């Protein structure tokens, strides 16, 4: 046996087990869920219904409400979170800034906080007798407590604040890491040419961070479209489904309402299609070559 063939066989031995695990626990469930989306029933008894589940999507008012809520979070929260992460990273990249380690840890800390714990914390802060209302009353900005979690608009705002608080630091770490890999001589040359710090940020930093900006935009979009924990633990989709997301609707179809795993799989693939389309658009806008 030749040396090259032997090395190739050894390499395949290393990747065989991980590949088998990925096929078994990732691709096989994906294919099975796709087949399930063309069926109806519960338990072990299913019947083929063709595209009936997909047709139902267009006439399902709860799905439309969940889709609207999810897209609302995406359109409002993701740009705010990415912009905040970029600005904070640029601030923490200042060479002479003191206590940089403390600031970085403090801003990143929410990312490693338990999802349930921080959701309960926000639910407590924005309750009728919570800290938010107490502060606003003490500042005389409101005359009576706001029912944050009982009003559709305010409940959505609380969800957006919660997501932004948790995930801004996550994106900030990516930007900060990329900024520290930019050659300082580029900024020195720009300073000699008379470019201000603001001009350097928009003309040097942002263009050089373009691949990272695209990456964080895609993963943030993907994560927001699968938003589940915050909504379930803070508002449980209420009031009146006004904060329900697609992922929570899938959970309800499977475990809260009368089980309908076929239709739940169909809604799941609706997320897949939306993620694929938005990712493709972001890559096109980002100028990535396919």
Image (cartoon, rainbow, N blue to C red):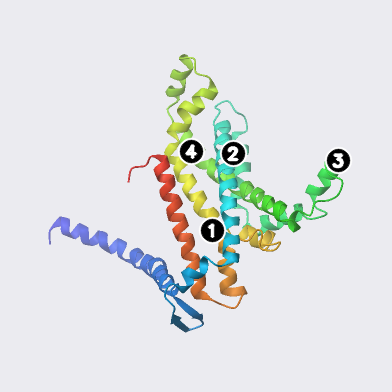
On residue 287, the disc is: none
Residue at image mark 1: 226
On the image, which quarter does residue 86 sit in? top right
Q: Residues within 10 Å of mark 1 (few under 14, many from 20)?
A: some
On the image, which quarter does residue 79 sit in? top right
Q: Nearer the viewer, mark 4 or mark 1?
A: 1
List x then y, in percent, for residue 186: 43, 23
The answer to which of marks 4 and 3 sits earlier in the sequence is: 3
The answer to which of marks 1 and 3 sits earlier in the sequence is: 3
Q: Residues within 10 Å of mark 2 (few under 14, many from 20)?
A: some
- Describe the element under mark 1 as helix, strand or loop: loop
**Residue 270 or 186: which is nearer the viewer?**
270
Q: Residues within 10 Å of mark 3 (few under 14, many from 20)?
A: few
Q: Up-down: is 71 above or below 179?
A: below
The answer to which of marks 1 and 2 sits earlier in the sequence is: 2
Q: Which residue shows up at 59% across the image and 46% down it?
A: 76
The answer to which of marks 4 and 1 sits earlier in the sequence is: 4
Q: Which residue shows up at 26% across the image and 62% down it?
A: 12
């Amino acid at each position: 046996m030749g040396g090259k063939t032997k090395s190739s066989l050894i390499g395949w031995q290393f990747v065989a087990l991980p590949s088998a695990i990925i096929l078994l626990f990732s691709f096989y469930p994906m294919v099975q869920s796709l087949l399930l989306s063309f069926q109806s029933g519960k338990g072990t008894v299913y019947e083929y219904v063709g595209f009936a589940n997909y047709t139902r999507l267009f006439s399902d008012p709860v799905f439309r409400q969940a889709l609207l809520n999810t897209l609302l979070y995406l359109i409002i929260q993701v740009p705010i979170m990415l912009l905040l992460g970029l600005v904070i990273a640029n601030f923490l990249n200042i060479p002479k800034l003191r206590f940089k380690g403390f600031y970085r840890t403090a801003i990143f800390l929410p990312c490693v906080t338990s999802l349930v714990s921080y959701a309960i914390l926000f639910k407590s802060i924005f309750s009728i007798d919570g800290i938010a209302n107490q502060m606003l009353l003490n500042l005389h900005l409101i005359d009576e407590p706001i029912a944050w979690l009982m009003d559709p608009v305010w409940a959505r705002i609380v969800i957006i604040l919660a997501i932004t608080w948790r995930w801004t630091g996550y994106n900030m770490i990516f930007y900060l890491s990329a900024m520290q890999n930019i050659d300082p001589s580029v900024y020195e040359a720009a300073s000699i040419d008379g470019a201000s710090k603001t001009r350097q940020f928009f003309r040097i930093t942002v263009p050089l961070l373009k691949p990272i900006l695209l990456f964080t935009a895609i993963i943030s979009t993907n994560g927001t479209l699968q938003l589940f924990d915050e909504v379930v633990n803070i508002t449980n989709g209420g009031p009146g489904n006004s904060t329900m997301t697609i992922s929570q609707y899938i959970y309800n179809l499977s475990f809260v309402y009368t089980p309908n795993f076929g239709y739940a799989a169909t809604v799941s693939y609706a997320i897949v299609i939306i993620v694929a389309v938005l990712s493709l658009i972001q890559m096109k806008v980002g100028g990535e070559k396919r």
